[in-house]
Image (spheres, coloured by chain):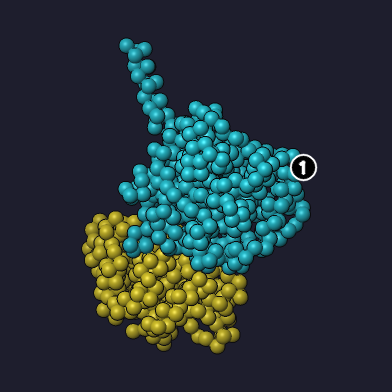
């Protein structure tokens, strides 16, 4: 299934889509497949597999910790592609979220080709904007992959046009000015950003969905976000469940039940 | 150089660089540089670019910066001929550009005063900085105290230990120093943490990057604040020797003192530009910080440049006895100068640097920063290559007071004292 189709299906059900993030290799290489599968079983519509990177400068302590453990555990790019393949087999469209350097180093064209053949549907690139992304945009076109760039509270309307014009699949709206990690409240600017992004899309005659991420971690927050965005993106809260669990089995149960709570949330928000 | 002439040079250093084709308006030096940064920072980077361009053409801004450089930082810095040191350099003359004599003890103050004034101009109340050896952190804390700005400095935990004196200095100056405990716990990780702070605080905070690195406009802006070093030195060498130097030598970590002293000489084709990177235990051992000598092309901290990385693009930990050079990336303009061949880059091992450190102490009565000792070791090599009649201009980027603990350990001075104490106790 494509990302676009997953969003359409959620919209047809009168709800927002639920997008879950987890880095490959965490809590272990095989464990990350089991955890992502539990996220799908609990109700995630779309999965983002994080590519562990040594210098995750957009991530807060929770994701830093998970990524560090994955790297110490010896995760390699081949493991990331295998994880994507296994998670995509659940039927949930699976994207890779990655900082740019590992893609650049691998070779942008080769990365796109191997992601596609693993069953991945695209990339989310937190430190790449369309201005520097020419090579990736061309490779995504060639291999029919989604490219998800981020918009921020600080983005000007002019930049929103550039970014949404380069996105395919969905637009990732960062709900707050800051790094990843669960917060107690959704930033008051988030709804306004989604509204501004939609206005720009409309002007361009586009109906790309807008997913909102950063800082969302509870069913109540998911419901709040579902009230104004097409998708709700959750990462650190899943990782926190795995970190805090006494065993992998307990962690998987906790992940599944958080996904179910969030899935319930995205259905209440409308 | 007279003070009046020097004051003229201060203004000139900032305004002469406008406009240049390098970098392009998008911050590209050939295939290097650019802006690989989170979208959340793009508005701030655009604002900074606009404000910097306006400020350097604003006579009031330039006058205020010149006044601070002359009457606070102590510019122009001296040019000192190192005659006894030069006896070890194959007969070449060695001229030291004395950035160690600046207020706060290094070239870092040149850039920081400029960025602190810009911070105020943009209406921001807080600055943050990364620091390795602590030189940039101390300079930033100093400028923040002077201009009444709040200041937070991120420093790798390893570096807070090996540069403890500078941590105390920053705290005395009113800055908050945050030891960074992630990753390799050195300069690279301090940069990550400073970026994380900035993404969350960009409305009222300026990230005062300490080297010619990061996303555009930082590599260009920091260069233009540092090019005063070369502008002054070029005039001073001409006045002293009646001709241009044969070579200009500097250490390269991120590369701000090197770009600072190189830039005014780039059009002088007869002048060799020689950068010396931290070779640690030797590039062949893998334990080094020589990015251009031993690295490969990639993207780090917002810029495309050479860096130390593995075959999958994971950053490798760098190693150097010098905290200020212990960084796995390098400013994009150096990558460009390296690719075009206008500058050459070689490694200096820890041992070579420490030998040069001791030699300058004993022959000239000047204690250099260990960073600068890499340039001094390089100057000995270049001097021997040039031989009799050659002239080498060296950027003595900082002073070594902060390095006494490292030097005492390296040379066994601590051990001797302990032995004496033990003897006395017996």
Total marks in image:
1
Q: Quadrant of residue A42?
A: bottom left
Is B233 on the left-hand or right-hand side of B335?
A: right
Residue at figure coordinates x 42%, y 44% from the top left: B348
B262 or A34: nearer the viewer = B262
Label 1 marks a residue whose chain is: B
- Could you say whether the residue bearing mark 1 is in a helix, strand or loop? helix
The answer to which image quadrant residue B365 occupies is top right
- Expressed as whole percent of the image width and height from the top left, the position of residue A263 reads 37, 75
The residue sitting at the front extreme is B388
Residue drawn at (37%, 82%) of the image: A143
Is residue B202 left or right of A254 when viewed as pictured? right
Residue on which disc 1 sits? B4
Q: Pick whichever, B49 or B107, lies toward us.
A: B107
Which one of the lettered chains is coloured yellow?
A
- Quadrant occupied by the N terminus of chain B: top right
Q: Residue at x 26, y 72 (%)?
A: A82
Q: Is residue A1 visible?
A: yes
Question: Is residue B334 or residue B46 the one in the foreground?
Answer: B334
| Position in image of residue B104 (x %, y %) | 60, 38
Vertical relation: B409 (above or below) B237? above
Residue A175 showing in the rendered view: no
- Which chain does cyan denote in the image? B
Q: Position of residue B127 (x, y in %)?
A: 59, 50
Which corner quadrant holds the C terminus of chain B? top left
At 70% from the left and 48% from the top, the residue drawn is: B10
Q: Is residue B287 above or below residue B91?
A: below
Indicate the position of residue B74 as horizontal and vertical percent values. 67, 38
């Amino acid at each position: 299934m494509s990302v676009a189709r997953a969003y359409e299906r959620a919209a047809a059900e009168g709800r927002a889509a639920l997008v879950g993030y987890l880095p490959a290799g965490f809590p272990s290489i095989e464990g990350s497949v089991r955890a992502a599968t539990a996220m799908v079983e609990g109700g995630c519509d779309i999965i983002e597999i994080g590519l562990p990177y040594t210098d995750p400068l957009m991530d807060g302590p929770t994701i830093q910790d998970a990524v560090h453990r994955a790297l110490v555990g010896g995760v390699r790019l081949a493991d990331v592609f295998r994880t994507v393949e296994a998670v995509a087999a659940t039927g949930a469209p699976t994207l890779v979220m990655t900082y740019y350097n590992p893609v650049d180093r691998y070779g942008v064209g080769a990365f796109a080709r191997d992601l596609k053949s693993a069953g991945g549907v695209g990339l989310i690139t937190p430190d790449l904007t369309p201005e520097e992304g020419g090579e990736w945009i061309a490779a995504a076109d060639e291999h029919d992959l989604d490219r998800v760039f981020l918009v921020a509270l600080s983005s000007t309307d002019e930049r929103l046009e550039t970014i949404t014009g380069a996105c395919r699949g969905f637009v990732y709206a960062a709900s707050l000015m800051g790094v990843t990690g669960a917060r107690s409240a959704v930033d008051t600017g988030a709804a306004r950003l989604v509204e501004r992004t939609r206005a720009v899309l409309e002007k361009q005659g586009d109906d790309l969905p807008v997913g909102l991420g950063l800082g969302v971690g509870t069913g109540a927050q998911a419901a709040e976000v579902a009230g104004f965005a097409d998708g709700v993106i959750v990462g650190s809260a899943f990782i926190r469940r795995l970190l805090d669990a006494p065993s992998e089995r307990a962690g998987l149960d906790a992940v599944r039940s958080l996904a179910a709570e969030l899935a319930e949330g995205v259905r209440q928000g409308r | 150089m007279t003070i009046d002439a020097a004051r003229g040079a201060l203004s000139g250093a900032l305004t002469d660089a406008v406009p240049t084709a390098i970098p392009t308006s998008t911050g590209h030096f050939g295939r290097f540089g650019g802006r690989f940064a989170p979208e959340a920072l793009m508005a701030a980077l655009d604002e900074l670019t606009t404000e910097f361009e306006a400020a350097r053409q604003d006579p009031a801004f330039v006058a205020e910066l010149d006044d601070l450089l002359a009457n606070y930082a102590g510019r122009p810095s001296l040019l000192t001929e190192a005659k006894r040191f030069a006896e070890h350099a194959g007969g070449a003359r060695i001229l030291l550009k004395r950035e160690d004599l600046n207020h706060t003890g290094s070239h870092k103050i040149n850039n920081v005063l400029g960025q602190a004034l810009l911070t105020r101009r943009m209406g921001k109340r807080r600055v943050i900085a990364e620091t390795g050896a602590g030189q940039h952190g101390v300079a930033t804390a100093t400028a923040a105290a002077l201009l009444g700005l709040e200041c937070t400095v991120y420093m790798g935990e390893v570096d807070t230990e090996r540069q403890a004196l500078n941590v105390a200095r920053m705290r005395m100056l009113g800055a908050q120093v945050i030891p960074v405990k992630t990753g390799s716990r050195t300069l690279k990780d301090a940069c990550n943490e400073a970026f994380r702070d900035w993404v969350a605080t960009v409305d009222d905070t300026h990230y005062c990057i300490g080297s010619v690195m990061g996303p555009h406009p930082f590599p260009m802006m920091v260069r233009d604040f540092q090019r005063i070093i070369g502008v002054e030195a070029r005039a001073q060498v001409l006045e002293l020797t009646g001709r241009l130097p044969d070579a200009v030598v500097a250490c390269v970590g991120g590369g701000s003192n090197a770009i600072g002293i190189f830039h005014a000489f780039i059009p002088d084709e007869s002048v060799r530009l020689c950068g010396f990177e931290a070779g640690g235990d030797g590039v062949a051992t893998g334990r080094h910080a020589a990015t251009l000598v031993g690295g490969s092309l990639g993207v780090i901290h917002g810029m495309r440049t050479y860096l130390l990385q593995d075959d999958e693009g994971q950053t490798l930990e760098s190693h150097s006895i010098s905290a200020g050079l212990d960084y796995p990336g390098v400013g994009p303009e150096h990558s460009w100068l390296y690719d075009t061949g206008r500058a050459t880059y070689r490694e200096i091992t820890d041992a070579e640097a420490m030998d040069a450190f001791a030699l300058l102490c004993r022959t000239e009565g000047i204690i250099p920063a260990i960073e600068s000792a890499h340039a001094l070791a390089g100057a000995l090599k270049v001097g021997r290559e040039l031989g009799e009649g050659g002239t080498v201009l060296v950027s003595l980027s900082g002073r070594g007071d902060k390095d006494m603990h490292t030097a005492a350990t390296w040379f066994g001075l601590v051990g001797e004292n302990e032995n004496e104490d033990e003897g006395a106790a017996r």
